[in-house]
Image (cartoon, rainbow, N blue to C red):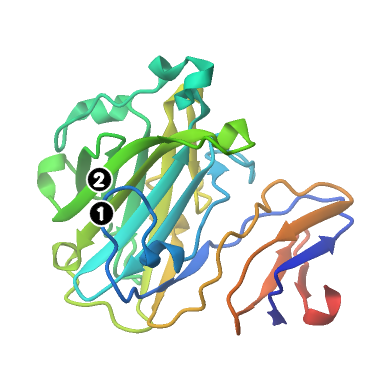
Amino acid sequence: MLLFRTLFVLVCTLSFSLFASQAFVTVKRCDVAPQIDAELVDDAWNNALEISNFIVLREDAIAAERQSQFYLTYDDEYLYIAFRCFEEMLNPVLNQSENFKALGKNHDEQEIWRDDIVEIFLAPDANNSQHYFHLAINANAAIWDTIGMGQAEQWNGVYKKEAKTFVDQISGDIKKSAGWSCEIAIQLKSLGVEKIQEGDEWKANFCRVARTVDETSSWAQTTGRFHDPGSFGKIVFKENNAATKKISSMSELKNGSNEFSGEKKSNTEIILEAHFSNGDIVEFKDTDV
């Protein structure tokens, strides 16, 4: 275990590919519920872990061209999820916004499957991930929802939701200069959960379909499709989880020197391990950085 300093550099000589272990994240309870406005500026999101590094479906840990970020938090009544999806074609400078699709406008409307969307897979019973809820949401905040691979009428959740497009005028990276964001509050009782308890474990995955480049990507690497509950990541709920955030991408490691940076609040500790394809696991300690 190491103390996570403001900036550190790992220098590795990599001559074999890395493989993905099960995705894992801890989720901190929020003191005040976020306002569901798709702005992502509330303290609830500022204190939540920023999760990114989406990888392309059916590829071996290849970073997605259209990257996404998501955040999780909760309280006694709701699970809160926010996404920020980067899409450079929404930058007016490029004059290509007509390539971005947001056709679906109503609940359970089939048009949503032609849109740029995020998909959410939630299995509140970690011991039975085959029973999971599936939601899709687009930039109009239109939602399609069901249980597993069932029909839309099989289940309807109870939500607060909002979505909007954005342009970042000060971003120096064209790939992150524009995009769309959404926030959704899912009523726990509509998921069959009375209340989230300290230490509860769920299985989940968070995915993106970027129609402009015909790309599908996900947080947890799957075996070839989103509906793959055996590959879902693990989320663990904590009342006072350490607020680590803005961890840089590690999905494009290369031979030689690699830089991995991050920000932390005081008294934050993490475990940092490198898993190699030959089975080796290397743990970096505070004396190594």
**Regarding mark 2 in the picture, which secondary structure is present there?**
strand
Q: Quadrant of the N terminus?
A: bottom right
Of residues 152 and 188, the one nearer the viewer is 188
Q: Badge 2 is on which residue?
A: 162
Q: Residues within 10 Å of mark 1 (few under 14, many from 20)?
A: some
Distance from the alpha carbon under mark 1 to that under mark 2: 6 Å
Position in image of residue 257 (x %, y %): 87, 53
Tell me if residue 47 comes above or below residue 163 in the rendering.
Answer: below
The correct choice, above or below, for 276 with respect to 200 in the image is: above
- Horizontal side, residue 20 vs residue 119: left or right: right
**Three-letter amino acid code of the residue under disc 2:** Glu
Residue denoted by label 1: 36
| Residue 65 seen in the figure | no
Q: Where does the image place residue 231, in percent across and percent down from the top left?
A: 47, 56
Q: Say what amino acid the circle numbered 1 marks.
A: Ile
Say which element carries label 1: loop
> Is 22 or 1 nearer to us in this picture?
1
